[in-house]
Image: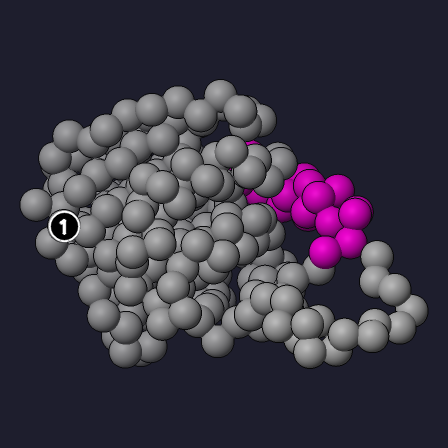
Amino acid sequence: MARFSQQPPHNNHSIMNERPAAQAAARSTTRTATSPSKPLRDSARFLRGFVRNPAQVGSVVPSSRWLEQRLVRNAGIAEARTVVELGPGTGGTTAAFLKAMSPSARLLAIELDPNFHEHLSQAFHDPRLALELGSAERLAEFLGARRLSPPDAIVSGIPFSTMPPEVSDRIAAAIAQVLRPGGRFVAYQVRAHVAGFATPYLGEPQKEWETLNVPPVRVFTWVKR
């Protein structure tokens, strides 16, 4: 999980490889740091983000791989053409989405924290990924600027429980406005506040718990009618 979205002030190679062709074929389009210390570094980045703004960070550690895979399933990432992620943080969920997406799909990731945004810019070199620094309230603006089609899936880790209510309502309204009919909005939250904001726009959600995460989180899934 990452910071909530509001207007800012202005996730052993050998020495020689005798099979270069096989090595090239095995490279992934998504390039991220893969050293054994990466989970520790990501946890440290989340902790620093929490210290900077404790009311604006949803968790002090990145999402678990079990939560990431639940989000991929619930949002239908493999079948989506356009995916939006609100609050990608250090990019764990971002990497999971890119891995599941088709080669022709696009992912728009909107991050408010400049430090997280800079880290994502350096960690990912995937042409399917578009990064934006700013508020989730500007969702329609960012989609239009990138000339992206209405999203098939929107996934949010921003903590609606700590946002000003008017900001939460504007974000929920923006999500409902841009999501295509039949599209899915999936929110993973420690608390249930997001349901109070999104349900008036999208109806009742499916509700689940992901206990294999620290902390355990609620996962809400809406389908736009």
Q: Is residue 182 above or below residue 218?
A: below
Identify which residue, 59 or 30, lies in the foreground: 30
- What's under tag 1, amino acid-wise? Gly
The residue under the point 76% across, 74% down is: 19
Identify which residue, 195 or 113, lies in the foreground: 195
For mark 1, give the secondary structure: loop
The residue under the point 59% across, 40% down is: 62
Question: Is residue 57 at all visible to an observer of this figure?
Answer: yes
Residue 194 in the image: x percent, y percent?
A: 30, 34
Residue 110 in the image: x percent, y percent?
A: 43, 60
Query: Which residue is situated farthest in the right direction here?
Result: 15
Q: Tally the marks.
A: 1
Answer whether residue 56 is magenta in the image. Answer: yes
Q: Which residues are magenta?
A: 34-59
Q: Is residue 25 above or below residue 83?
A: below
Instruction: Name the residue tied to disc 1.
Output: 182
Q: In this rendering, would 100 be left or right of 184?
A: right
Question: Is residue 111 at all visible to an observer of this figure?
Answer: no
Q: Is residue 19 above or below residue 164?
A: below
Identify which residue, 120 or 56, lies in the foreground: 120
Residue 105 in the image: x percent, y percent?
A: 35, 67
The residue under the point 40% across, 54% down is: 85
Answer whether residue 67 is magenta in the image. Answer: no
Q: In this rendering, would 66 be left or right of 197?
A: right
